[in-house]
Amino acid sequence: MCGIIGINSNKPVSATIINSLKKLEYRGYDSAGIATLSSGLINEIKSEGRVDNLEKNSLVQSMQGTIGIGHVRWATHGLPNSINAHPHSSQNVSVVHNGIIENSTLLKKFLVGKGHKFKSQTDTEVIVHLITENLKSDDIINSIKKTLKSLHGSFALGIIFKDQPDLIVGARRGSPLAVGYGPNENYLGSDSYALKSMTNKITYLNDGEFCIIKKDHVEFFNEDGVKINKKILQLSSEEKEYEKGDYKHFMAKEIEEQPITLKNGIKEYIDTVNNDINIYNIPWKQNEISSITLIGCGTAYHSCLMSKYWFEELTSLEVNVDIASEFRYRKNRFKKDTLYVFVSQSGETADTYAALDLCNKNGMKTCSVVNVIESSIARDSEFVLPIHCGTEIGVASTKAFLGQILILYILALKFGSVRGDLEKKELSEKLKDLKNLPKLVEETLATDNKIQNVSSTFNEAKGSMFLGRGFSYPIALEGALKLKELSYIHAEGYPAGEMKHGPLALIEDGMPVVVLAPRDNYYKKTISNMQEVIARGAKVLLITNKSSDEIISENIWETIEVESTNDDLLPFLLTIPLQKLAYYSALKKGFDIDKPRNLAKSVTVE
């Protein structure tokens, strides 16, 4: 979603802010802006589109000021144009904002009555005028405190003041915000990735907290304006500058990095010497958990669906899966013996964090599977399982998806083992197969040429379907999502057995249909469902695994064979050609693969 950068330094900051905003581009955005203080004035420059457009502005290049804020915006209120871009400024105050102010209409009506004039369509501008109004009768601390208490909704804020040229205010409720520390300068950021280029010393604000950032020190306050102490965390230095290298897009690189993602996860969680699982610090006894609820959004939700099959197959646990945005509004019947598992690439997904917060308030057992161990979801979970896939820039998740399902599979094996649902010999065989998985994924990546050839047919169609049964069904959903995200082609994922219950009406002559039919327990049933769509004129792309047995069907348009392994692990291999199909479809259409329209990498608003 939106991204924030603030810098308070003893040297000009505009170029550094621009460079930091470029690191936030992967979050998804439609406009950008910067504001600095110099000569007793707020200087604000904004532009529609990419940060490059902002950087090319000659006024930005000559911009002065040793204190400033910058923003990349993902539109929620108002069209994506330069007027609605952040920062928003009055004569005295400039604000950048991530999140949504739910009572902005009422606040705007109140402020207009006070004589304030608005320029934009955004909810953010009410914050500017509210602070300006409060400063008429209060100092900065009380004005900020009073303003924050008036705001309903979620926010991360960066604020500078014309009459306070030595400080930046940061505030957080719901949306993530971090403070970074450097020599003779300090920073504010919505994303530790953007701050990493300047510092590896970070403090995260918790909900309701705000801070005052000066060049040489930072003060933190709770929601009542009482000064508090905060820990400084040292970020991992493992992740070096992440560049595309010889790849045309980050997504292409990230698809090819998936064997490394799997190797890292297996190395972290599998004890190859004792042939066991390295998850020993689970804070609950096995008899304290009788059910598990998996919660996520988008691709992470598909990871949860995938793991439901594994948990049911490998354990005696009762298993439920929830979409995070639905979970928090339902009348949940919380149970003390349920483990709630939250899955998120960024660890900042607003809906998922809200579901976690609800569970924490009800005293539930919570575990998170995340890629960013410093994230809000990781920090507020009782137990954290990092996926160790490294930085992922492409908005459409690839290696993080494989990382998520890997860790969830290993967790299912662990529960099956400690509960006695899985015999030691069976566990040993599954771990042996798992160690060979990175090599199989590497070999499956070689299906490149055939995928390139079939992608044109999907581009020419008005829609497509992805079908699978059992373990393959969540992968069909994920394949359809990838095609939608990147190629803007209507695609639907369905359980193959559901076709005759309505969706078969959509099949028409020449419609491309992807059928995932690995040679597992569902194979013959899936092939029968495939015949139903072929009989209605569909062009079927069959994706199965290599076997000496002939495929028992005729009139298949194209077949792609992935490598073979045990049934549990086939979803990892089936995922690869679907990722490549989406990638090549978008490539042939000339779309922005790493930054698809209307989407964001880190969804930090509800």
Image (tube, rainbow, N blue to C red):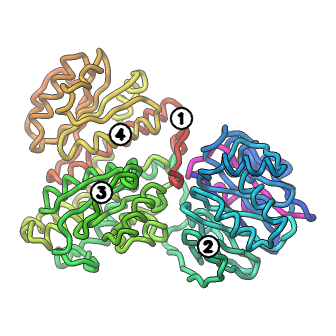
Highlighted range, magenta:
16-38
Whether residue 90 appears in magenta in the rendering, the answer is: no
Residue at left 61%, top 47%?
74
Please rate how many residues cluster around mark 4, counting C-alpha atoms within 10 Å: few if below 14, some from 14 to 19, many from 20: some
Please state which of the two labelled residues, at mark 1 or mark 4, is closer to the viewer: 1
Please state which of the two labelled residues, at mark 3 or mark 2, is closer to the viewer: 2
Task: List the residue tagged with mark 1.
Answer: 591
Marks 1/4: CA distance? 19 Å
Q: Mark 3 or mark 2, which has the lower sequence index?
A: 2
Q: Which element is circle 3 on?
A: helix
Q: Which element is circle 2 on?
A: loop
Residue at left 86%, top 50%?
59
Q: Position of residue 446 (x, y in %)?
A: 32, 44
Task: List the residue tagged with mark 2.
Answer: 223
Res. 532 image quadrant: top left
- Number of marks in the rendered image: 4
Q: Mark 1 or mark 3, which has the lower sequence index?
A: 3
Q: Position of residue 9 (x, y in %)?
A: 78, 73
Q: Which element is circle 4 on?
A: helix
Amino acid at dot 1 = Phe
Amino acid at dot 2 = Glu
Left or right of residue 241, residue 131 in this image: right
Q: Mark 1 or mark 4, which has the lower sequence index?
A: 4
Marks 1/3: CA distance? 28 Å
Res. 290 image quadrant: bottom left
Task: List the residue tagged with mark 3.
Answer: 405
Label disc, if present, on residue 448 of the rendered structure:
4
